[in-house]
């Protein structure tokens, strides 16, 4: 399925129109090479070989003369590795890379850390057939919608790449990206008069920093900047601390920016705790604080930074090359006390072995932070870089923290999945309720696919007859059952099972649902599950996605049918509500595919089309 989706995306998103002279260049080269195989005598072969070399020289000469022949234009169409180009960023691609075009040829170039309107000099580092990648060397003129990045690490850590782009401009870029995916991958026509009515605007977030209740910072990019009414005059006191989970890496190789490289002979501290530098799985950018996590979490991070390098403690960072060392990750999760509403913090040390005596001094140090109510130790003996341990121990306090969402209380363990932005999750789950179109009379059946810890299904349970949730991770199912019991919810059933491997009998264990909620991970839904949904013909499907590319692909299958399938897919008309949940805080897009009725809102009133 993954390879199929990759081919599908490549075929639809990387097609680039070629200049009129390029086919002639290619056909001429092919003819010259093909003619060699038909040479009958050595003299003729030598003449043809000389002719070929002459043609290759004409077509491939990379000299900088000003000839306007087709052959020289052909060589300039493909920039060479190491070549410096003057470029202007036109837009942002998915995941934030700047899209540029070579001025004379229109050849597509991608560059990290450039923004729309920015004029710069870049050096070609890689060519990939239909496009090239460049590294920015120098900015000639700034980009549009420029703001000051408040984070001192914004230029290096690889997370908040667009911190110096205004929030409104980020929304426009993200909405444009999703629109393009819906058109090119989802195969919807933006020329259709109904298209603009189907695409709903992004729902923005009103909290800019300290919003994450979990941040995983190993080799992954962090979300983009959130809303700032006046970013150029940044005032930290204006923002609420809003964080749930943050995961830092220990490493024996510290990464330095070019302007901060130590001089030869200087004594440097190679041990680091922070975020992996972009493109380096074995080098860590040392971080003293992160604006995405809560203030109590930053206090804990500062305490660990001040203490863990002390030689007397005997602590060593894990080395991914030699597979030696003790400390792998530091994970910080923030919840809220159900009774007081005050923040409570869980600290989780991920280590290569269980040696609590080594962690005892650190535990005593950080437990002095009032918000710390839990200190855990996950032991991961594998050579990989995962933060999930095979064994888990409680070093201090309790083994879980709590969070409130849509009026329900959820217990969160060290490895539980929970929305990274609780504030925006409230907005998201309210949208899901609205899109589900529940009657509220307790008569409906909800099928919750990829239910995780059950948060979506449990928030809907109060309005329906029964919720049936399916999830592949056993621990998540255990958490879902525990959270149902915690909230006195008896009309929810959670089943552990792999939705990528469903058989023909899937669906026999529950009544036909009135509403289907699907919240898959980034690869999207397997074709088996899509075919099941097409046969199921549920009155309403709510698709919650963290990857707009695979979401657009699945939307194509759900709305337009599966090629070669004889099922009647007219039941799923090619239209529905597409509501975009801002990708900045939680990377979520909601797509609601209307099967029986299409909900439209005019003047705040729901109408049936």
Image (cartoon, rainbow, N blue to C red):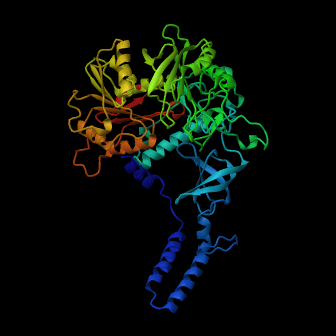
Name the spot of residue 219 as percent of width and height, x first.
55, 38
Q: Could you tell me if residue 405 is visible in this image? A: no
Give whichever of 198, 472 is nearer the camera: 472
Depicted 221 relative to depicted 379: above or below = below
Q: Residue at x 39, y 45 (%)?
A: 553
Query: Left of 599 or right of it: where is 222?
Result: right
Depicted 445 relative to depicted 219: above or below = above
Name the spot of residue 362 as percent of width and height, x first.
61, 19
Name the spot of residue 385 as percent of width and height, x first.
51, 36
Depicted 467 relative to depicted 27: above or below = above
Give whichever of 508, 325 is nearer the camera: 325
Quadrant of the rendered image containing residue 434: top left
Query: Left of 256 or right of it: where is 56?
Result: left
Give whichever of 449, 430 is nearer the camera: 449
Give whichever of 224, 388 is nearer the camera: 388
Q: Residue farthest to the top? A: 339
Q: Residue at x 62, y 55 (%)?
A: 125
Quadrant of the rendered image containing residue 519: top left
Query: Left of 377 or right of it: where is 573?
Result: left
Q: Could you tell me if residue 157 is visible in this image? A: yes
């Amino acid at each position: 399925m993954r390879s199929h989706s990759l081919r599908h995306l490549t075929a639809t998103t990387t097609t680039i129109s070629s200049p009129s002279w390029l086919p002639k260049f290619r056909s001429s080269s092919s003819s010259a090479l093909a003619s060699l195989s038909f040479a009958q005598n050595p003299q003729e072969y030598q003449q043809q070989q000389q002719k070929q070399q002459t043609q290759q020289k004409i077509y491939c000469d990379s000299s900088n003369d000003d000839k306007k022949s087709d052959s020289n234009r052909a060589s300039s169409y493909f920039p060479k590795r190491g070549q410096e180009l003057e470029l202007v960023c036109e837009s942002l691609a998915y995941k934030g890379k700047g899209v540029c075009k070579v001025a004379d040829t229109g050849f597509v170039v991608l560059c990290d850390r450039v923004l729309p309107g920015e004029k710069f000099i870049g050096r070609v580092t890689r060519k990939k057939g239909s496009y090239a990648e460049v590294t920015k060397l120098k900015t000639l003129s700034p980009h549009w919608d420029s703001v000051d990045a408040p984070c001192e690490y914004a230029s290096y850590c690889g997370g908040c790449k667009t911190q110096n782009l205004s929030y409104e401009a980020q929304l426009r870029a993200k909405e444009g990206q999703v629109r393009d995916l819906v058109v090119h991958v989802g195969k919807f026509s933006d020329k259709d008069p109904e298209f603009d009515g189907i695409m709903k605007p992004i729902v923005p977030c009103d909290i800019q920093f300290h919003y994450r209740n979990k941040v995983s910072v190993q080799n992954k990019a962090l979300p983009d900047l959130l809303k700032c009414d006046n970013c150029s005059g940044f005032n930290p006191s204006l923002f609420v601390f809003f964080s749930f989970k943050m995961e830092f890496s220990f490493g024996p190789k510290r990464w330095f920016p070019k302007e901060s490289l130590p001089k030869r002979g200087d004594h440097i501290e190679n041990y680091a705790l922070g975020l992996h530098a972009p493109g380096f799985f074995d080098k860590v950018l040392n971080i003293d604080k992160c604006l995405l996590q809560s203030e109590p979490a930053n206090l804990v991070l500062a305490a660990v930074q001040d203490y863990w390098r002390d030689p007397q403690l005997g602590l060593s960072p894990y080395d991914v090359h030699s597979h030696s060392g003790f400390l792998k990750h530091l994970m910080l999760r923030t919840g809220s006390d159900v009774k007081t509403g005050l923040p409570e913090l869980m600290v989780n040390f991920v280590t290569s072995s269980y040696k609590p005596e080594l962690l005892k001094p650190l535990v005593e140090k950080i437990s002095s932070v009032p918000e710390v109510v839990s200190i855990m130790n996950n032991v991961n003996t594998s050579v990989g870089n995962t933060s999930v341990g095979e064994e888990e121990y409680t070093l201090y306090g309790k083994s879980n923290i709590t969070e409130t969402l849509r009026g329900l209380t959820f217990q969160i363990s060290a490895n539980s999945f929970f929305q990274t932005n609780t504030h925006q999750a409230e907005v998201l789950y309210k949208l899901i309720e609205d899109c589900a179109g529940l009657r509220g009379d307790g008569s409906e059946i909800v099928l919750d696919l990829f239910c995780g810890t059950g948060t979506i299904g449990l928030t809907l349970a109060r309005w329906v007859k029964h919720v049936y949730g399916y999830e592949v991770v056993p621990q998540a199912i255990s958490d879902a059952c525990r959270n149902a019991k915690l909230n006195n919810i008896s009309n929810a059933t959670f089943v552990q099972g792999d939705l990528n491997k469903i058989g023909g009998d899937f669906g026999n264990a529950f009544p036909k649902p009135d509403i289907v909620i699907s919240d898959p991970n980034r690869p999207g839904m397997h074709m088996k599950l899509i075919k099941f949904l097409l046969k199921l013909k549920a009155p309403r499907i709510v698709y919650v996605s963290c990857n707009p590319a695979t979401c657009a692909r699945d939307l194509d299958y759900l709305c337009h049918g599966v090629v070669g399938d004889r099922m009647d897919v007219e039941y799923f008309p090619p239209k529905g509500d597409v509501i975009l949940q801002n990708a900045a805080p939680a990377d979520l897009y909601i797509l609601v595919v209307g099967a029986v009725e299409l909900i439209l809102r005019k003047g705040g009133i729901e109408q049936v089309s």
